[in-house]
Amino acid sequence: MAHWLYKSEPEVWSWDRQVEAGEAGTYWDGVRNYLANNHMKAMQVGERGFFYHSNEGKAVVGIVEVVKPWAHDPKDETGKFGAVTLKAVAPLPKPVGLVEIKADPRLAEMVLVKNSRLSVQPVTDDEWALICSLGGVTAP
DNA sequence: GCCAACGTTGGC
DNA sequence: GCCAACGTTGGC
């Protein structure tokens, strides 16, 4: 099963608000990037990903799960962009900071390091397991 | 607040 | 269809 990483500025949409949204989850709209959009189109319900705080915090803070597949964003007039719906699964007891990720040679190839501007990224199984363990949870 | 890197746009 | 110019993102 594939894994993902979602970036969000806590000022705009924080992990706490994702948790408050509960089981119903929230529509991850606003993405206007083809690559990120394509990644979301490829997602299956039940696939999990990391929730990353950019700018402020700069750390992986929690785990989210896809609860609804990709659907068109009604606010996008071009009809090209859409999003999946995500719910919070669990916080990381110990958030994994960007500094830590960069310091670990096993994570040097992460998209987060290589292409920091992409807002929705794939994560390999190895990267997933390693960050889960650094964060203090057993990989679900 | 600055600046580098990247994606997107628009002119040709 | 190419490429320069521009805007945005995000780390520092």
Image (spheres, coloured by chain):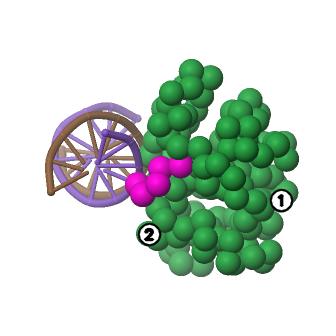
Chain colours: A green, B brown, C purple
Image mark for residue A45? 1
**What kind of secondary structure does the magenta stretch mostly adopt?**
loop
Secondary structure under the numbered disc 2 in the rendered image: loop
Stretch of the chain drawn in magenta: A55-59
Question: Which chain is mark 2 on?
Answer: A
Q: Position of residue A57 (x, y in %)?
A: 47, 54
Q: Position of residue A19 (x, y in %)?
A: 68, 71
Q: Note whether A43 is above or below A85 in the view shown.
A: above
Residue designated by label 2: A11
Identified at 50% across, 47% down, the residue is A118
Secondary structure under the numbered disc 1 in the rendered image: loop
Question: Which chain is mark 1 on?
Answer: A
Q: Position of residue A96 (x, y in %)?
A: 59, 44
Residue type, numbered disc 1: Val
Q: Note whether A65 is above or below A116 in the view shown.
A: below
* Quadrant position of residue A73: bottom right
* Quadrant position of residue A101: top right
